[in-house]
Image: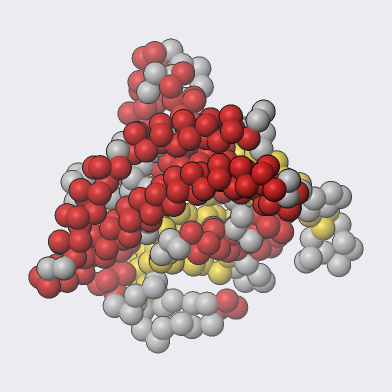
Amino acid sequence: MDPAEKIKELAATLASVTSVLDMDAMRTEIAELREQSADPELWSDQANAQKVTRQLSSLESIVTKLEGVEQRLDDLGVLYELAAAEEDADTRAEADRELEQLRKEIGELEVRTLLNGPHDEREALVTINSQAGGVDAADWAQMLQRMYLRWAERHGYPTEIYETSYAEEAGIKSTSFAVKAQFAYGTMRGEHGTHRLVRISPFDNQNRRQTSFAGVDVVPVVEQSDHIEIDESELRVDVYRSSGPGGQGVNTTDSAVRITHMPSGIVVSCQNERSQLQNKATAMSMLQAKLLARKQAEEQAALDEIRGDSVSSWGTQMRNYVLHPYQNVKDVRTGVETGNTSGVLDGDIDEFIDAEIRWMRSRERNDGR
């Protein structure tokens, strides 16, 4: 296809994206949020102030990105004309690289328009648990934690680790952390499921191949408008001393809090604050998020049963990471795969996440949701 036609095609896609995202509405919201952030009284409520500033930063980033891509697309046509007029192979190669980069960036922006679920715009609460595989599974859970934290760091998304339960030999039994960015839940919810690792175990003195599993749970962070009734009599609250790797004490007081919701069996913990009261408040917020997700899943299951759906979930095992005898990471649902395993484990997972969002939206449209 002629470069001019490719640029025209990308321009049409970009116009569709800006229409769906409603640039005028975003600019209006930015102006309102800037006015709120300039009010000194805003910081009397730290949680709300942080929410306002994060939302403002997110919207400004999207608008800046859209305007920048639009300008670069205009400049690209001029670059191709210059290359053709001067018969300059280097300029043509530069234009081709820019075209490919713009195709990728516009594709990412297009994915953003698909995040229109009821809770997609919320922050995400991520929980990782080691499963089958012993010490390798615990190590694998910690590798996944690092992968997601590096991914968030790449995008400038703030994160807060609420709890980490370290395994005795290596790795972690479980961890819970928040990704505090608008649309974090909609972006990450496709990561929910079982992640399978195949490698030569660094903990086996016979260098045998080991398969290990870790479960990833992603739920939206609750907001004040959510109403989840929790009966205090159904909770068991335990306090304990925070510990680090190898059982090292982190705090000198019993400030960490573990809450068990006995009817559901859901257990949440928080140990990142010095105050027991603060840890309990955060743990209660985490429990509300888990119970809200459980309630939504039950309601969806009931609708699926009424409609006669034979499959009400997307399955559990969702991605395989093979480090031996070859290098490959493959999503079992979307078919996306790469041999760049080190890049993936260092947080380069956007290709997988974008494909998940498209796949989920396609499934939901087909299901009439």
Q: Residue farthest to the front?
A: 85
Q: Residue farthest to the bottom?
A: 252
Is residue 310 positioned above or below 322 on the image?
above
Question: Can you give x and y, in whole percent of width and height, for residue 307 in the image?
Answer: 39, 13
Figure colour scheme:
secondary structure
Asked whether residue 242 appears in the rendered view, the answer is yes
Asked whether residue 137 appears in the rendered view, the answer is no
Q: Which quadrant holds residue 5?
A: top right
Q: Residue farthest to the right?
A: 206
Q: Which quadrant holds residue 112?
A: top left
Q: Quadrant of the N terminus?
A: top right
Is residue 204 positioned above or below 298 on the image?
below
User: Which residue is at the front of the view, 242 or 224?
Assistant: 224
Question: Can you give x and y, in whole percent of width and height, for residue 315 in the image?
Answer: 56, 32
* 280 left or right of 213 in image: left
Count of all numbered marks drawn on residues in the image: 0
User: Which residue is at the front of the view, 273 or 80?
Assistant: 80
* 15 left or right of 347 in image: left
Residue at the spot 18% in from the left edge and 46% down from the top edge: 225
* 325 left or right of 331 in image: right
User: Which residue is at the front of the view, 64 or 200?
Assistant: 64
Question: Can you give x and y, in whole percent of width and height, for residue 312 in the image?
Answer: 47, 25
Residue at the spot 19% in from the left edge and 65% down from the top edge: 37
Q: Quadrant of the C terminus?
A: top left
Residue at the spot 41% in from the left edge and 47% down from the top edge: 66
Question: Can you give x and y, in whole percent of width and height, for residue 306 in the image?
Answer: 36, 14
* 230 left or right of 340 in image: left
Residue at the spot 33% in from the left edge and 28% down from the top edge: 299
